[in-house]
Image: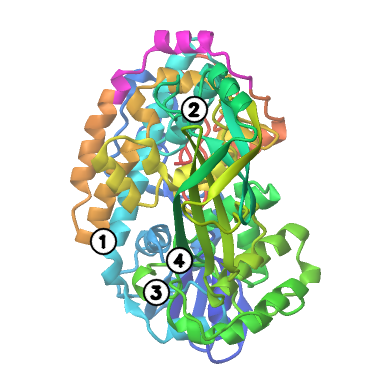
């Protein structure tokens, strides 16, 4: 008997439907001929809690830290025991086993740890599926690999899991305990990813609070030229008071020039024209989709992830959504005509766009060299039933289809023109953009581009029709929202100065992963560290105090860069995990030594940030059950025992969602 273990039931159903023969539903698995297809439910196992290593660790005490498991243990999640029992029985009866976890680091860990935990000693094949459509699953079933080829990926995932446990358990306990000494009654969770994300928001809020607007002044002149009219802007010289961006800080020079300008004659002294071609935006990764959906429809990042999961699992309209890739396999190009024909049925807008597409085009999106474990989000080709999609699902689905459709449209072509005039011995500049080929642009509703300038010839004359001085003020940075915070996590290299760290962060997935970014934001909100003010995300008083009390290294993204560098070496170069974990323990001891009640007390006392609303009992209880909630209710005394979070797919630990 062959046993295939999928990561989740939806994938198991897709595998069973792709096998020859009729599928029969059994308790915890599907039977198709001599093949049984069973499943995990996300992580069936989680890292054992501290008290599994020593009952004394039920009490949170500073003198217990750091807690360093040896050997490491896994324990079943409470709601997973039934499915684990099914898998244990099936493994005893199996002659061969196929690992069908998602094709990524976490998916490799999730299924393999169950196979090993239940004692299977035979060989394991690897089935890699990123598209639930039957033809795609059938192709994947025809090219099984040896799971041994993915052991380095498994070791890297296991090392990441253990490192997050060490970091989250020890630092959360340390800062919670010194928080009690400082008068804070509650859990203060610290994590390798969560805390730097909070640090981004805290520092942005501090910039906004410290911002003092400064007035500056601009002068424009409407000019008559041979081909029509245009507006040009004065470029004050260095003999005037300017800020570091060249803005005029004093009004009198602009007023004096404006008074002399009407009727003045000048000349076009420099003309630059440049033709530009802009390829269509690439198909979406999950984070890129979350950014666009937040901007366009004000959808929170977590809502977009949940919608994508439903479109993938329930409706089977899009491919695997938790992808960090924006490219598609070349073989998908040949299937695109049929796929898009099905995907666009029943929607007038999509059908219109499909009618305008040239399906013989091949854009830069079709590139096997840039496709890793996953490819970009794309429609499966299944005909959508829009009556079964809610409004948000339909909007997100159209975005996914659109960004594949535009790959069959020509580039956007424009001519960018810059003109410099000399009037009364002063420089004035104008610029415009002329649309030459609309290409893919009509499929996107974007802000208006710079209008075109009239026809110009270098050396021609110009006469001032009108001029005016406008008073403006510098503006503070915008507070983060879901879109900008996800984008910051994707492009975290922008927030560090060390060149080597910048390079590592550019090469990695950024801060968090496609699957965890939305959850990290929601966890920070649920734990009271972030507060939503309409669409803005602001740090609470507790969030500010925690970041200001922690060592700076714990609240910046550099540590993630170093971790990803080491994990990549384990996964790609076969390095041993032990040196990585040993170095982490050294680092951990230094951070624990910095836990100081007086520093935290002062940070809490001086924080001027807003208070987070108290979670409802139902919401708090949900958090204590696992997936990113508060990790505990009211606490008193340094010996209070804490409930253990049950975790989720990313296997969050006590007080820490990664």
Q: Residue 378 is drawn in which quadrant?
A: bottom right
Between residues 274 and 258, which one lies in front from this camera angle?
A: 258
Residue 2 numbered mark, or none = none
Start-end of magenta stretch: 591-611
CB within 8 Å, label 4 to label 3: no
Look at the picture and state if 346 lies above or below 247: below
Query: Which tag, 4 or 1, sits closer to the chain's start?
Result: 4
Q: Is residue 146 left or right of residue 400?
A: left
Is 379 a magenta residue?
no
**Magenta stretch: residue 599 in it?**
yes
- What is the distance, in whole Å, between disc 1 and disc 3 at their CAs? 25 Å
Q: Of the residues under marks 2 and 3, which one precedes in the sequence?
A: 2
**Which quadrant of the rendered structure holds the C terminus?**
top left
| Label 1 to label 2: alpha-carbon separation | 55 Å
Mark toward the viewer: 2 or 4: 2
Residue carrying label 1? 152
Judging by the rendered image, the residue that carries numbered circle 3 is 367
Q: For mark 2, what is the residue? A: 247
Determine whether 147 is above or below 197 in the image.
below
């Amino acid at each position: 008997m062959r046993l295939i273990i999928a990561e989740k039931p939806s994938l198991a159903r897709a595998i069973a439907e792709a096998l020859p023969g009729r599928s029969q539903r059994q308790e915890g698995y599907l039977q198709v001929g001599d093949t049984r297809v069973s499943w995990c439910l996300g992580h069936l196992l989680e890292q054992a809690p501290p008290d599994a290593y020593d009952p004394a660790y039920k009490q949170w005490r500073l003198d217990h830290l750091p807690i360093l498991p040896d050997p490491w243990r896994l324990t079943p999640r409470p709601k997973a025991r039934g499915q684990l029992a099914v898998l244990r029985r099936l493994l005893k009866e199996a002659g061969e086993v196929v690992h069908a976890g998602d094709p990524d680091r976490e998916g490799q860990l999730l299924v393999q740890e169950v196979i090993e935990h239940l004692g299977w000693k035979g060989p394991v094949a690897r089935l890699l599926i990123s598209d639930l459509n039957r033809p795609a699953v059938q192709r994947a079933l025809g090219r099984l690999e040896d799971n041994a080829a993915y052991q380095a990926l498994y070791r890297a995932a296991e090392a990441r899991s253990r490192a997050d446990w060490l970091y989250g358990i020890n630092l959360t306990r340390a800062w919670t305990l010194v928080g009690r000494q400082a008068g804070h009654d509650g859990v203060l969770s610290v994590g390798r990813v969560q805390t730097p994300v909070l640090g981004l928001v805290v520092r942005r809020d501090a910039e906004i609070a410290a911002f003092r607007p400064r007035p500056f002044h601009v002068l424009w002149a409407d000019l008559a030229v041979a081909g029509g009219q245009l507006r040009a802007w004065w470029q004050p010289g260095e003999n005037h008071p300017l800020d570091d961006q060249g803005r005029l800080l004093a009004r009198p020079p602009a007023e004096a020039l404006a008074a002399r300008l009407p009727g003045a004659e000048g000349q076009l002294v420099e003309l630059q024209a440049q033709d530009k071609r802009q390829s269509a935006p690439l198909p979406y990764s999950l984070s890129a989709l979350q950014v666009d959906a937040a901007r366009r429809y004000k959808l929170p990042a977590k809502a977009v992830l949940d919608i994508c999961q439903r479109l993938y699992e329930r409706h089977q309209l899009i491919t695997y959504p938790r992808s960090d890739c924006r490219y598609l396999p070349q073989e998908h190009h040949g299937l695109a005509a049929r796929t898009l024909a099905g995907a666009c049925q029943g929607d007038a807008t999509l059908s219109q766009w499909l009618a305008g597409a040239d399906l013989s085009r091949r854009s830069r999106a079709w590139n096997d060299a840039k496709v890793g474990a996953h490819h970009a989000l794309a429609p499966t080709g299944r005909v959508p039933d829009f009556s079964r999609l809610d409004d948000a699902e339909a909007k997100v689905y159209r975005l996914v289809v659109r960004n594949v459709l535009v790959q069959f449209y020509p580039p956007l072509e424009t001519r960018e023109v810059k003109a410099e005039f000399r009037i009364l011995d002063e420089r004035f500049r104008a610029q415009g953009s002329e649309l030459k080929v609309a290409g893919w642009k009509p499929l996107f509703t974007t802000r208006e581009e710079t209008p075109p300038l009239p026809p110009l010839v270098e050396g021609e004359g110009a006469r001032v029709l009108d001029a005016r001085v406008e008073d403006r003020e510098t503006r503070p940075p915008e507070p983060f929202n879901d879109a900008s915070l996800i984008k910051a996590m994707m492009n975290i290299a922008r927030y560090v100065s060390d060149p080597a760290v910048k390079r590592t962060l550019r090469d990695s997935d950024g801060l968090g992963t496609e699957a965890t970014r939305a959850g990290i934001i929601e966890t920070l909100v649920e734990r009271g560290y972030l507060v939503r003010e309409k669409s803005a995300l602001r740090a609470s008083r507790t969030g500010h105090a925690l970041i200001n009390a922690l060592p700076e290294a714990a609240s910046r993204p550099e540590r993630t860069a170093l971790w990803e560098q080491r994990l990549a070496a384990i996964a790609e170069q076969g390095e041993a995990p032990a040196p990585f974990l040993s170095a982490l323990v050294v680092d951990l001891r230094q951070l624990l030594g910095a836990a100081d009640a007086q520093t935290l007390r002062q940070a809490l006392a001086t924080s001027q940030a807003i208070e987070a609303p108290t979670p409802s009992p139902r919401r708090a209880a949900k958090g204590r059950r696992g997936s990113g909630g508060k990790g505990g209710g009211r606490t008193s005394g340094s010996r209070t025992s804490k409930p253990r979070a049950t975790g989720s797919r990313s296997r969050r630990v006590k007080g820490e969602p990664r």
